[in-house]
Amino acid sequence: MPPQQPESTAVMATYGRFPLTLTKGHGVWVQDSEGRRFLDCVAGIATCTLGHSNRRLQRALNAQLGRIQHVSNLYRIPEQELLAKWISTNSCTDAVFFCNSGAEANEAAIKLARKYGHQKRQISAPMILSARSSFHGRTLAAVTATGQDKYHRGFEPLPAGFAYFNYNDLDSLRSCLSEHHSRAVAILIEPLQGEGGIVPGNPEFFAALRQLCDEQNLLLISDEVQVGMGRSGSFWGYQQLGIEPDAITMAKGLGGGIPIGALAVKKSCAVFEPGDHASTFGGNPFACRAALTVAEELERRQLLDNVQKRGEELRNGLAQRVGQWPNLLEGERGWGLIRGLLLREGALSAIDLVKAAMAEGLLLVPAGPQVVRFVPPLVISRRELRQALQRLDRALARLS
C-alpha cells in the first residue's frame, strides 16, 4: 500500500509553508492534492528552467539511471567534463568545480578567495567584501557574506573576514575598500539582487567595480545562483552589465530541478589543488546529465529569445498594472524572466498578494516584505503569460 498522509510531520520546522501540497506538474502548470491547477511563476524559486515533467529531461535522466547514477570524484566523470566544457565555452571562465547548491558554490568561492589572498597576495587574514541586502546562502560563511542582519541573528559568532557596502553605491564601495585595503582580496556580488528585492545592477557601478578590482588586484566573483542559466535573457547576469568577473557561482536553474551547483573561474585565479576542496555528490553523472539536458534545451529551443520576448511582455504587463492600481503598486523592475512587482508600503504586503494570487490559481513568491517576484519556467508561452497577468488582476481586485 502507498504511504498514508501523516497527520503531523516529523520534518523540522525551518520553513513557513503555505497550506498547499503540490503533487504533479506539466510545463508551467502544477496541480495540488485536491486537484486544483495553478500557473507556476515560482518554478521552485527560479529553478525549474524547463518547467515540470519535461520529456527530454525525463528521457535523459531515465537513460542515465540505466547506465550509472553516481561515482566518486576519485575517477573521471565524462558527463562532468562535458558540462564543464559547456560552461567554460559559454562564459568567461576556464575551469569548474561542481557541488550541490548555491550556498555550496558560494562557500567554494569564499575558500578560493581566501586561498588566493594567502597564495597570490601574501595576506594572512583575507577579507571578502559583499553588498548589503544581498543573499549568498545559508551555510555559516555564505550567510555571513549575506549582507542582511536578519539572517545573522542567533548564529553568532559569525566567521571573521567579511565587510559590507551599499549595492550600486560607488562611494560606499570605495569607503569600504579604503577601510579594508590591506586585507581585501575579493568582492562577492550579485549582478541582480534577488532576495534583496529584485534590484538590477547599475552598469556604471559595475564598470567602476571591475576597474577597482583590476587596480587593487581583487577577485570579482559574480553570484549567478538565481539569475544565471538564461533567466536574465542572456546566459549569465554579468553579460547584462558589460563586464567580466573572475569567477561565477551558479545552481538553481542549472539542473532544472535536480540539485547541482558550480563555481567557475578564470585560469588566473584557479588556485585550488587536489585536496583543497571536495564534494561527495558534486558533479555526479546524474546531476550533470540533468544540467547538460537543460543546456541543450536552452540552445535547441532558443530559450534566450523566449526569455527576452516574454520578459518584455511581462515588464509591459506589470507596468500597466502599476498604472491601473496606483493605490497598491509602486513600480516594477528586473531582467528577462526575473521580475519584481513593488508594492506600496502601508497598502499591501508581499504575503498579502501572494495569498490572493494563490486563491486565483497563480503562484508567486516574495522577494522581501514589499516585492513580489515573478520567476516562471523559461518555457512559458505568450498565452500562459497573459493568463498569469489576468490572474494577477483578479488577485489585485480582491485586495483593492
Image (spheres, helix red, strand yellow):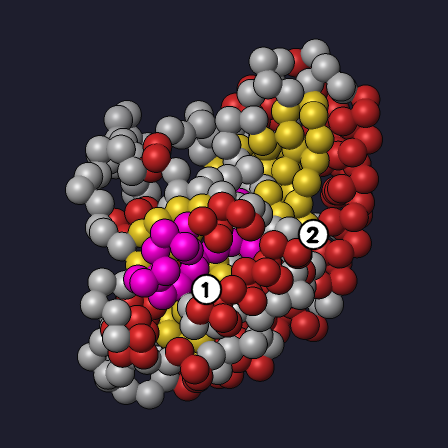
Q: What type is the residue that disc 2 sits on? A: Gly
Q: Determine the secondary structure under disc 1.
A: strand
Q: Is residue 190 magenta?
A: yes
Q: Position of residue 70 (x, y in %)?
A: 31, 74
Q: Nearer the viewer, residue 109 or 227?
A: 109
Picture residue at 49% right of the left edge, 70% below the top: 215
Q: Position of residue 227 (x, y in %)?
A: 56, 55
Residue 173 seen in the figure: yes
Which quarter of the rendering shows the N terminus? top left
Q: Is residue 186 left or right of residue 310?
A: left
Q: Residues within 10 Å of mark 1 (few under 14, many from 20)?
A: many
Mark seen at residue 221: 1
Picture residue at 55% right of the left edge, 50% below the top: 170
- The image quadrant that residue 100 belongs to is bottom left
- Asked if the residues shown at circle 2 and circle 1 are in contact, with their CB atoms under 8 angstroms apart, the answer is no
- The image quadrant that residue 319 belongs to is top right
Q: Which residue is mark 2?
A: 336
C-alpha span from label 2 to label 1: 22 Å
Q: Where is 52 relative to 78, above or below? A: above
What segment carries the magenta color? Answer: 176-194
Q: Residues within 10 Å of mark 2 (few under 14, many from 20)?
A: many
- Residue found at the far left of this picture: 157
Q: Is residue 278 magenta?
A: no
Q: Position of residue 390 (x, y in %)?
A: 76, 30
Q: Position of residue 195 (x, y in %)?
A: 49, 41
Picture residue at 36% right of the left edge, 60% below the top: 181
